[in-house]
């Protein structure tokens, strides 16, 4: 079933910087948790990567190769979880995007974008975006931009040219974008021309690309779990053909390992329904980072973790958990159910699943939260941790949680103003190998 799964449309410049290939490997191990409705390779002019100088055909073949390797481990993945699609179904949604797109963002040439957008500039990818968004499905199309936005820009330009204002508005309302920086000239154009478009611009407000939230995928925190040694042990060796495809070397700036990068992974991490993320609320934070309103779009915010306050901390704070989860899924590629670990199933106040829980409380009222009934599919012992995600909420005062490391906890609602929110995150972690963490988020609203 696909009900409730995020619908992901991936725009990628895969084949150049090998981190896109890394991101695709990880995404394919999560193909049961999302519905991949499109993969659109867009190619920069003179793009070159570990596969040599790219051609449109060779770039497409990189994607097809990864999917074929996924197909070789799909049956084993399916021993661990339902919902993994057939490889042929994934290959059917790979569509050719624009070729030879330039990246100039020349402020002195504001019309530069029209090289890539306009009459006669349709691509298989831009047409596919329109077709998917038009489908009779209540779920939004979550566009993950790993490369440029040219194909999305062309799709929106065409809809604006060929439909009424109301039809355009309806079309735009069905799209959510999470773009990793600006990787072609069309990103700023999109944000200016379509101010109602849900658009996360994952880029540091100071313009320093190394400060962006997405860099927390591999910068800051415990960088040892981004090393080649970690990748060789848990991904690249002894974990089947898909793991062997994972690129061993990338450019990671101050990270000394020069191995795991996956700079684009936060774009789809953001939409993953994992009990922590709230995809419709960028300020809530989660595996894909946390964002604040910047005029008509969303841009990087900061979290304080330990002694560090930064945008990258909004992502690296979750790295131990998401790396353990990746390790487990790579085990799924080659091991039987009994030989691998699986994440706990969390229940909060008798509410099972991963959905967000909202409650209201008056100042002075005792709020009781219970994870009794949570279980582990492997029979592992569970530990519990409740805490306030201060930056995600509107109330900035102190909240004292009693029983923060117990299955049941409580706190007294502070003197918050009506409408102010407190975000309580529950982490339930098993003692398996590797230990896996499941989340639930409770948003307490002051009455």
Image: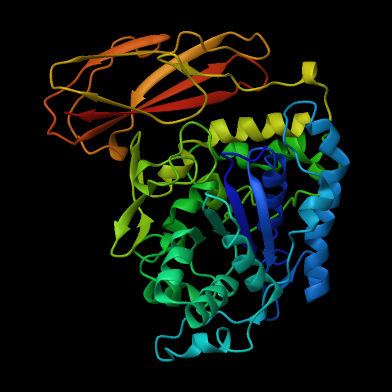
Question: 227 or 344, which is in the foreground?
Answer: 344
Quadrant position of residue 92: bottom right
Residue 232 position (above or below residue 42) = above
Q: Quadrant of the N terminus?
A: top right
Please identify the quadrant where the C terminus is shown. top left
Q: Is residue 182 above or below residue 213?
A: below
Residue reaching furthest right?
72
Does residue 52 lie above or below 137 as drawn?
below
Residue drawn at 72 percent across, 28 percent down: 81
- So how many labels did they put on this image? 0
Residue 11 visible to an observer of this rendering:
yes
Query: Looking at the picture, how far across and down is residue 252, in whole percent?
Result: 59, 55
Residue at 78% across / 64% down in the picture?
Answer: 50
Residue 100 lies in what quarter of the image? bottom right
Of residue 141 and residue 286, the one placed in the foreground of this image is: 141
Mark yes or no: residue 202 visible.
no
Q: Position of residue 414 (x, y in %)?
A: 15, 23
Residue 353 x %, y %: 52, 24
């Amino acid at each position: 079933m696909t009900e409730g799964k995020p619908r992901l449309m991936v725009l990628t410049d895969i084949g150049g910087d090998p981190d896109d290939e890394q991101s695709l490997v990880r995404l394919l191990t999560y193909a049961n948790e999302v519905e991949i409705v499109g993969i659109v390779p867009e190619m920069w002019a003179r793009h070159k990567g570990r596969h040599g100088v790219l051609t449109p055909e060779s770039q497409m073949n990189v994607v097809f190769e990864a999917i074929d390797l996924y197909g070789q481990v799909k049956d084993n993945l399916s021993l661990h979880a339902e919902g993994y699609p057939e490889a042929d179904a994934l290959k059917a949604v790979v569509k050719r995007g624009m070729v030879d797109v330039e990246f100039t963002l020349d402020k002195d040439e504001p019309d530069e974008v029209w090289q890539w957008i306009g009459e006669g500039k349709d691509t298989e990818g831009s047409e596919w975006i329109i077709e998917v968004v038009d489908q009779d499905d209540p779920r939004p199309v979550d566009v993950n931009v790993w490369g440029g936005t040219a194909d999305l820009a062309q799709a929106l330009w065409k809809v604006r040219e060929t439909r009424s204002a109301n039809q355009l508005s309806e079309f735009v309302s069905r799209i959510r974008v999470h773009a990793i920086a600006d990787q072609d000239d069309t990103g700023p154009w999109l944000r200016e021309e379509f101010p109602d478009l849900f658009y996360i611009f994952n880029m540091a407000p100071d313009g320093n690309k190394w400060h962006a939230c997405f860099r927390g995928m591999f910068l800051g925190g415990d960088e040892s779990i981004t090393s080649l040694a970690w990748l060789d042990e848990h991904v690249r060796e002894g974990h089947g053909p898909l793991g062997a495809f994972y690129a061993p070397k990338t450019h990671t700036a101050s990270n000394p390992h020069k191995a795991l990068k996956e700079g684009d992974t936060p774009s789809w991490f953001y939409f993953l329904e994992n009990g922590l993320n709230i995809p419709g609320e960028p300020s809530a934070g989660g595996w894909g980072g946390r964002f604040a309103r910047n005029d008509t779009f969303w841009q990087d915010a900061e979290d304080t973790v330990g002694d560090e306050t930064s945008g990258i901390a909004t992502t690296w704070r979750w790295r131990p958990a998401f790396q353990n989860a990746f390790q487990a899924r790579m085990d799924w590629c080659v091991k039987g159910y009994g030989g691998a670990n699986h994440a706990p199933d969390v229940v909060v106040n008798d509410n099972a699943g991963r959905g967000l829980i909202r409650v209201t409380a008056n100042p002075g009222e005792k709020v009781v939260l219970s994870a009794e009934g949570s279980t582990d599919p492997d029979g592992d012992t569970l530990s519990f941790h409740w805490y306030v995600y201060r930056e995600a909420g509107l109330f900035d005062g102190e909240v004292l949680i009693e029983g923060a490391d117990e299955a049941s906890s409580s706190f007294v609602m502070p003197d918050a103003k009506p409408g102010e929110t407190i975000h309580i995150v529950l982490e339930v972690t098993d003692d398996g190998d590797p230990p896996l963490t499941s989340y639930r988020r409770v948003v307490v609203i002051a009455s």
